[in-house]
Amino acid sequence: MTIETEFGANADDPVSFTTWAFLRELKFGQGVDLETSSVNDQYFALARTVRQLLTGRWLETRARQREAQAKSVVYLSLEYLLGRQLENNLLATGLEEVAEQALRGLGIDLATLREAEVEPGLGNGGLGRLAACFIDSLATLGVPSTAYGIRYKFGIFRQTFVDGRQVEQPDSWLEMGSPWEFPHPESAVTVDFGGSVEDHLDDDGVTRRRWVPGHSVLAIPYNYMVPGYKNGNVNTLRLWSARATRAFDLQIFNSGDYARAVLEQTTAETISKVLYPEDSTPQGKELRLQQQYFFVAASLRNFLDEVLPEGFDLHGLPDRVTFQLNDTHPVIAIPELMRVLVDERRFDWDDAWAIAQRCFAYTCHTLLPEALEVWPVDLLGRLLPRHLEIIYRINDELLARVRAAYPHDELRARRMSIVQEHPDRAVRMAFLATVGSLKVNGVAALHSQLLRDKVLADFSELMPEKFTNVTNGVTPRRFVRMSNPGLSGLLTEAVGDGWVTDLDKLKGLEPLADDAEFRRRFREVKTANKERLVDLLQVRDGIEISTDAMLDVMVKRLHEYKRQMLKVLHIVTLYDQVKSGEVAIADVTPRVFVFGAKAAPGYRMAKEIIALINAVGRTINSDPALEGRLKVAFPANYNVTLAETLIPAADLSEQISLAGKEASGTGNMKFALNGALTVGTLDGANVEIRELVGDDNFFLFGLTEPEVADLVSSGYRPSSYYEQNTSLRRALDLIASGTFSGGNAREFEPIVANLLGEDRFLVLADYQAYLDAQARVDTAYADPEAWTRSAVLNVARSGFFSSDRSIRDYLDRIWHASPVAVRD
């Protein structure tokens, strides 16, 4: 279809037509003319112009998918870290140049309108960004898919720093509205909570259980379009917003109690207010569980009642859909489907369970026991009483199977029970997901192996057929084609433009790693990307950095296992070596250390580490003796928009988590694809990155996962490393003495005490190996030609890490769904 026919107009010139459509939206959509319009008016007008083009394709996609009655993938995720939509949608529709020319003719700079867009506050870290990459790839591959989540009014939070410490502020991303969403209040779904369960006789005289809810809320759907790359296919992301069933009580209002008149609405809306509400209180825990059930209940109801054709026989449901559970957050969907089938659709239990087990697939994103959700039985019984009954029955059947297979191993039965008894009675959601799913996958080769061998070892022994691996990937559209235009042009010139949807074509770059002219141009692209970053940080954060230094980047969630603390100790050691005279400043490789990270509001140690990074940065950045050769930059509120400029500029990618703790990582993939070299442990997808790019092009250090296990089991004593390593002792003593805190020796005492007394993630054990790896980095960086050669090979050999490949693996190993061809 052409742009003219999709808009229902007859235009020979796409630029002229786009100009007309834009001015029409400005006038009739925003109610202003060009002369009086604001930048926000212009952004909304352009966004709606693009949205109109996509809408025709979206409706066509839905129509042909209904006709095909093909199997669909339903992606259930609590997070979608989408990033800005305007440029992505221009890229997908092939309208970049057309829009730029049309706006230029009106005296408007497209870049200015891009900057006016506020990034959606629908995610936090890698989990949400992976979900966004996956729905992009599903659309690009033409796979029928609907993604479901929550329309958070305030996202997680907007991070600011006050005296170097993190302060959370509301992320009011919807304050100006969103031009990309389609609200459908007429399609609201009722979601129930609380109450009790009772017996009743159905029309056939069969005694059944019936949930009698205590209260309900409405789930209001907001649809977002998810376009494939230049293929005419547009899938759907449906987000739910909570609203009260009765928003306003006029009688109470007229009595003068204005606050109580809207109390029901206020309480209901809390469910979709904030991503990951602080759960250190009972109220916070309850709100999190409410969120999870709210969105999966509404999503299942929507799919069963509106996506499936009327009268569909649900015995055939596994042939029509796979519900992909993105971590444990949506796992309550399993007992919810059982409730619908058994209680509402009157299925026999065994038939319903056979259906449910073939409909769900579970992706586990962690190896940390504390990250595998458990819900107290008391809370589940109060909030979802019928679901708790269903979980008990599922568990009874599981334990009967376990005892039959292992008749003299009661300890195994207790280990595998979905309901744990100690320290408190609670439901293990990862166990429920494993039992209730057709497949369970890890997200990197090492992670999947450890999942089978350690985290879910009893289940993999009993049910080995359930376990598989799908290594994560990232979309090359956003994280190379969009975010790195200089490199994109170089790649297209070298291997053709097919790499955007077939990243394996990057292998054609390998011979060019030995071409001096290509390496020169590659370095020019990197320098230009650094200049872009310099400009952005100056405007965005008032941070000044040099383009002449190595850009050493560590951006990810702030969690102790990711070991930002190890990076801090390296920086403090460099500072100490210069200040003590051990190393001359002229011999120090110029480096800019860039951090980007948010800490969960209740995660005290993570917030202390953020404060320490900023304190070290203040000291180093203001010390004239360092001659500007070392610089620490920590821009607040790291997000996708900043990543799109920062990642292409990076020279060194820090992937230094403790081996056996990171599930996969996707930041490591983005950096490698954009020509940064990695310093990292054998953890997560680092293992596969190193295998593919070659050991000579990767800076490996640190304990392996078996070595970590041996050290911990033998009795790890972190203070021994402090006692034996002079550099480490001096670095920790500097922190403890108040050198970075204005002489206040107590300020960072919790960090030092934690490292010396516990050091759960073996920072001190890997310290010297990390310093040795950084010395190798310095040596390599001193040879620009060799460094550039390694950088080119990183790009050339990282095609495996496309999310398109990940989705093909899911299709082959788990979903068994097929693309639906675009109609001519």
Image (tube, rainbow, N blue to C red):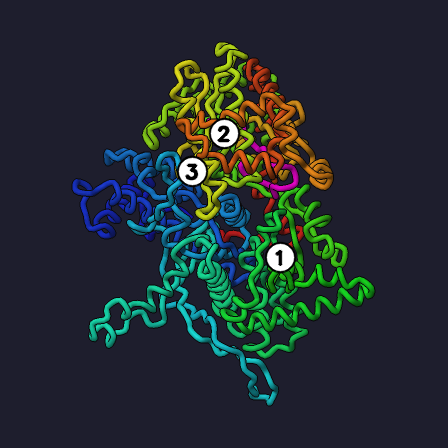
Which amino acid, mark 3? Tyr
Residue projecting furthest to the right = 408
Question: Which residue lies at the image location 69% right of the left edge and 45% below the top edge?
Answer: 450
Which amino acid, mark 1? Ala
Label 1 neighbourhood size at 10 Å, few (<14), some (14-19), many (20+)?
many
Which amino acid, mark 2? Ala
Of tags 3 and 2, the one toward the viewer is: 2
Residue 107 picture location, percent across and down = 24, 33
> Is residue 1 in view?
yes
Residue 638 is marked as: 3
Element marked by disc 2: helix
Residue 66 picture location, percent across and down = 51, 63
In the rendered image, which quarter is residue 152 located in?
bottom left
Rounded to the nearest whole Å, what is the CA distance between mark 3 and mark 1?
Answer: 30 Å
Nearer to us in this view, 649 or 310:
649
Name the residue that disc number 2 marks. Answer: 736
Rounded to the nearest whole Å, what is the CA distance between mark 3 and mark 2?
Answer: 28 Å
Residue 497 picture location, percent across and down = 52, 33
Question: Which residue lies at the image location 58% right of the left edge and 73% below the top edge?
Answer: 341
Does 474 sit above or below residue 441? Answer: above
Residue 396 included in the magenta stretch of the image: no
In the rendered image, which quarter is residue 691 located in?
top right
Residue 430 is marked as: 1
Residue 268 is marked as: none
Residue 823 picture location, percent across and down = 50, 53
Question: Which residue lies at the image location 34% right of the left edge and 41% below the top edge?
Answer: 14
The span shown in magenta is 648-667
Nearer to us in this view, 228 or 248:
248
Element marked by disc 3: loop
Residue 655 included in the magenta stretch of the image: yes
Q: Main secondary structure of the magenta part?
A: loop
Q: Which badge, 3 or 1, is on the more N-terminal residue? A: 1
